[in-house]
Amino acid sequence: MMRLFALIFIGIVLSAKVYAEDLLETTELSRRALSMPMPLLDSEQKLGQFAAGRSLFNQMWVIAPSSDEDIDGLGPLYNSISCLACHSGNGRGHAPDGPTEKMRSMLVRLSIPGENPFHSEPHLVYGGQLQEFAVPGVPAEGRAEIHYEYSTIALSEGETVTLRKPSIKLVNPGYGEFGEVLTSARIGPALVGMGLVEMIDKQEILSWQDADDANADGISGRVNWIIDDATLTRKIGRFGYKASIVSLNEQIASAFQADLGLTSALFPEENCSDVQLACQQAVSGGKPELTAEQLQAVSFYLQFLAVPAPRDQSKPEVIRGRAVFDEAGCTACHRPQIKTSSTAKPAAFANRLIAPYSDYLLHDMGEELSDHRPDSGATGAEWRTAPLWGIGLAEKVGDRVGYLHDGRATTLLEAILWHGGEGQKSRDGVINMPKADRDALLQFLKSL
Ligand code: HEC
Ligand code: HEC
């Protein structure tokens, strides 16, 4: 009798767990795999809000003045006319294959060299980001060419892989020579589970820090603390490649301002430097150009995008691959399980075990991945552990995809082979392991 009771109890617990995940996840496998609403949006009204946010995310914004004030305000300087351009299907962007190809889902950050290894100043003329496009009457800033240096790496059992290392050359300056300038090229990352990332328990992230590598595993990892000037409190940065942005709203508003040229209450100033006069004088699409309701709608959309459910978890090769992932030390940074805060909002996001495969910490990834450009509290070599949830669907969602911050890797294996610094030991393990294990590891990544 007790046994039967226990079984029923376990049954209830298991189905409760499945039920909770069901509300956050999707099993969609089409090109829309990363674009579905969470099943917890269970009313017409909530799905309507989601759809409103989606249409703003997909919107091709227009130059002011226009006949539709709701969607104008693009520029004066901008990288793209829509969010979707760089986050196609909410998936990742890619890097051009050479200098003649345009960057379509990528941007280049700029700064001037300085003494501080963690922070740098924006370029005095060109600002913190190169905008390749401008409205009529305003010069565009120029173009970034990508050049590659190729090398070949040999793996166990005779396999070889060709890697390409990018360097950036700025051409066609719109406002005079660039002079001494530091660049950082970045592809649009996939946007998975943004609302849940914001709700990860702060203590969880803190507990993984090991700034002085006390456990001597070669992996330190540290929080990027961001000071809020207004309240003088410090918060954990979670968003962006340098984990330098605290909240989803701020991340979205800064994308609108820097990438599309749309001002909002959070970023009320147009993205023009002191010397870019035509930019400053261009017609505005409203003050601000993006209303609080529009910002809220995009935020709602990204917050409630369903997380893709892992696939093929009972396939022997995937089971083996998961073990290899652990044995190779990948889980030290790509954390497979994280708890969200007990006070998370909405309540459906509270106390959830999620699997983003990141620790949201900065790690020194070595010389080869460094862009030698200090940025918002991180050195050029430090990057936030890339979350891996949904990574196996990248090629389903996008026609062409890149991996790593600058899209230099065109396959998951290449991405692993670039790991240096704190990730060097893992990478060497992958090079030396039997091919069957390596293949299983890649199958596991494809199942996420
Ligand atoms: C020109 C390409 C481009 C456009 C256009 C663009 N993004 Fe991004 N997006 C990026 C890049 C690159 C990053 C990483 C930035 C960094 O860390 O420096 C990013 C990061 C993000 C992130 C954080 C992801 C994470 O894992 O932390 C969000 C959210 C986001 N973008 C939303 C938007 C929204 C909303 C829009 C439209 C307003 C937009 N993006 C437009 C390229 C773009
Ligand atoms: C020391 C921490 C660390 C370890 C250990 C580590 N990674 Fe990473 N991983 C990172 C960081 C940081 C990035 C992002 C680097 C960048 O964008 O330049 C990354 C990126 C990746 C990417 C590309 C993700 C994307 O979105 O483009 C893959 C795939 C990956 N890691 C797999 C692995 C595997 C498999 C292992 C184990 C063999 C591993 N990593 C070990 C920190 C780590």
Image: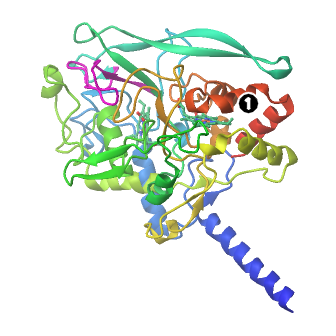
Residue 319 is a magenta residue = no
For the image, the number of numbered tags is 1
- Counting from the top left corner in percent of width and height, residue 199 is at 46, 59
Provide the residue designation for mark 1: 429
Q: Residue at x 58, y 47 (%)?
A: 34
Q: What residue type is labelled 1?
A: Gly
What is the residue that sits farthest to the bottom in this orientation?
1
- Counting from the top left corner in percent of width and height, residue 137 is at 20, 18
What secondary structure predominates along the stretch shown in magenta?
loop
- Counting from the top left corner in percent of width and height, residue 340 is at 51, 62
Q: How crowded is mark 1: few (under 14 residues within 10 Å), some or many (20 or more)?
A: some
- Locate the N terminus and report the quarter of the image it occupies: bottom right
Q: Which residue is drawn at 53% across and 25% down?
A: 366
Q: Please report the bounds of the magenta region as a residue range.
A: 106-132
Residue 110 is a magenta residue = yes
Q: Which residue is drawn at 70% across and 52% down?
A: 310
**Of residues 362 and 314, the one drawn nearer to the viewer in this rendering:** 362
**Of residues 25 and 442, the one drawn nearer to the viewer in this rendering:** 442
